[in-house]
Image (cartoon, rainbow, N blue to C red):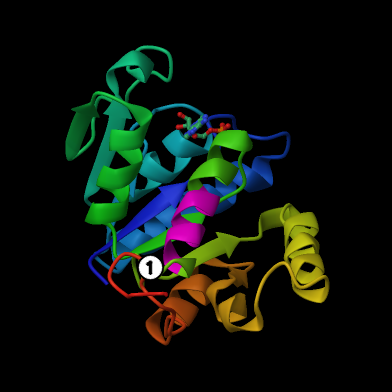
Amino acid sequence: MKSIAVFCGSSPGISPIYRDQAAALGKELAERQITLVYGGASVGLMGAVADAALHAGGRVVGIIPHFLNSREIAHTRLSELIVVDSMHERKSAMAELADGFIALPGGPGTMEEYFEIFTWGQLGLHVKPCGILNINHYYDPLIAMFNRMSEEQFMQDKYRPMIITDTTPQGILEQFSSYKAPVVPNYLTEDRT
Ligand code: AMP
């Protein structure tokens, strides 16, 4: 795996554990010579993951839309900062540049980014792994929600392997190395009639 996109909070969270573990992920990526692709900000967990990767000698590519450039305070020491025109461009650039995706704890923005890429996988638009780094049990309610989706048959069982969760960066990356995307119809290319 050459590059991984990380989605995470523009806030640091209440406990230092979030920042520490975001930094642990950044360091782990750098040590494995995996490029970090992320939203390009210097604040919150976004800044923590980027700083740690840079500190460990890693390559970090930030992608930020013009209008967030000052608001999210773009990181000034990245290997590369790509400024795009819109949120949609940011997300599709991240999706294209990365071989896999990891969501750290975050707010609605993080959730939106994770779910968009997850659902693109369900639709067969990519076969890249999407992981959730469940720091401090933050994502336990989301994992419970996934279980409920399955139980109530709002998510087919064949998509369950797409839900990759772990409590450590090493654990997630280990799961990524053996990931096999479910075989799903590509709705863009296959005749579904
Ligand atoms: P948050 O997790 O809410 O702190 O947001 C984390 C990242 O998601 C930030 O880089 C935001 O720019 C981005 N973000 C916030 N709102 C949205 C949205 N509606 N769609 C896509 N990304 C968003």
Residue beneath the point at 57% across and 72% down = 164
Figure check: 11 above or below 101: above
The answer as to whether callout 1 falls within 8 Å of ligand 1 is no
Residue 77: percent from the left, percent from the top? 23, 30
Figure check: 53 above or below 69: below
Q: Quadrant of the N terminus?
A: bottom left
Q: In which quadrant of the rendered view does residue 167 lie?
A: bottom right
Q: Which residues are magenta?
A: 114-121
Residue 109: percent from the left, percent from the top? 55, 35
Left or right of residue 10, residue 52 in this image:
left
Residue type marked 1: Tyr
**Residue corresponding to mark 1:** 187
Residue beneath the point at 59% across and 29% down = 11
Residue 139: percent from the left, percent from the top? 71, 56
Q: Quadrant of the C terminus?
A: bottom left
Please state which of residues 36 and 19 is positioned toward the viewer in this rendering.
Answer: 36
Q: Main secondary structure of the magenta part?
A: helix
Residue 118 inside the magenta-drawn segment: yes
Residue 124: percent from the left, percent from the top? 39, 70
Q: In which quadrant of the rendered view does residue 88 lie?
A: top left
Please state which of residues 10 and 96 is positioned toward the viewer in this rendering.
Answer: 96
